[in-house]
Amino acid sequence: MIARVASVERHGVYIRMSVEAPEIARAAQPGQFAMLRVADTSSTDPLLRRPLSLHDRNASEVEFFFSVAGRGTDILAGKKPGDRLDVLGPLGRGFALDENMTGRTACCVGGGRGIAPLYFLARELKARGASVHILYGGRSAADVPLREKFEAAGYQTFVSTDDGSFGFHGLVTDLFEKQAAAERPDRLYACGPDAMMKTLAASAARLGIPAWFSLESVMGCGFGACWGCVHRILRDGTPEWVKVCEDGPVFAGPDIVWETGP
């Protein structure tokens, strides 16, 4: 659909962009994504759309949070309020959510731009009665620009930075181990680099915590036609190649065959 850019906020290399797209906003679920065409409507350069997870929504708008990591996201970051934007979504399968989370603790772990889908998720978990803890990891204090937004929304937010410039000095995976030792969460949800999520998956399995992970992948189409985003997932104990865009991007931890990381 052709949407209108409502607002753009810049936080260093990170961008928060709200887009008026009421049909997508009504249908959206946490963990789903949209494919955004960044070229002008009269151009096909760049040809492929960019996949972005849904950061938040209200009755008429959806919000994206992304970092400038190449030509496509640089063009997207240059959009201004009032610009028209071709948005396809919502797409994919999101996070598995219990209807009633009263009395349970949910831990949401995000690394860098991987924090993007966890705000929408945290709101839905809180609405179901969960006590939500946010673990937010970055390279430095400048790499965790959403910290104040999570805190303002009332979530217990714990930050780790690789260089120790803010919060816990070390990896967010180490921070999770520290927090889990003090209070074992009932659910774990994560998004970020594969190496981070692989380590978290191992911790969750060892501690017996049900866990779900949102995989990042290069996507050509976003709806399963191009097979450009395959990942090995266990089906009845047997690894199978599945499409992250259509079968995911969220998968249960025990089902994921991790290809990279320590």
Image (cartoon, grey):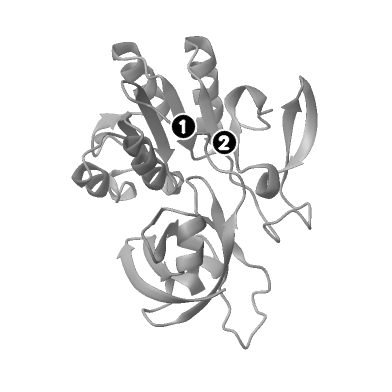
User: Which residue is situated farthest in the front direction here?
Assistant: 99
How packed is label 2: few (under 14 Cα within 10 Å), some, or many (20 or more)? some
Q: Position of residue 144 (x, y in %)?
A: 31, 46
Of residues 166 and 57, the one drawn nearer to the viewer in this rendering = 57
In the picture, the quarter occupied by the C terminus is top right
Instruction: Please state if 128 lies on the left or on the right of 26 as rendered.
Output: left
Q: What residue do we see at 78% from left, 57% from top?
A: 225
Is label 1 or label 2 in front? 1
Amino acid carrying label 1: it is Tyr
Using the rendered view, name the quadrant where residue 94 is placed: top right
* Residue 29 vertical position relative to residue 59 in the rendered view, above or below: above
* Residue 31 vertical position relative to residue 38 in the rendered view, above or below: above
Amino acid carrying label 2: it is Asp
Mark carried by residue 35: none
Q: Position of residue 204 (x, y in %)?
A: 49, 18
Q: Circle 1 — which element?
A: strand
Q: Position of residue 210 (x, y in %)?
A: 51, 20
Instruction: Please state if 134 lies on the left or on the right of 84 as rendered.
Output: left
Q: CA distance from mark 1 to mark 2?
A: 14 Å
Using the rendered view, name the quadrant where residue 135 is placed: top left
Q: What residue do we see at 31% from left, 20% from top?
A: 103
Of residues 3 and 229, the one drawn nearer to the viewer in this rendering = 3
Q: For mark 1, what is the residue?
A: 189
Q: Are marks 1 and 2 in contact (CB under 8 Å)?
A: no
Q: For mark 2, what is the residue?
A: 194
Q: Position of residue 199 (x, y in %)?
A: 52, 24
| Residue 138 can be seen, yes or no | no
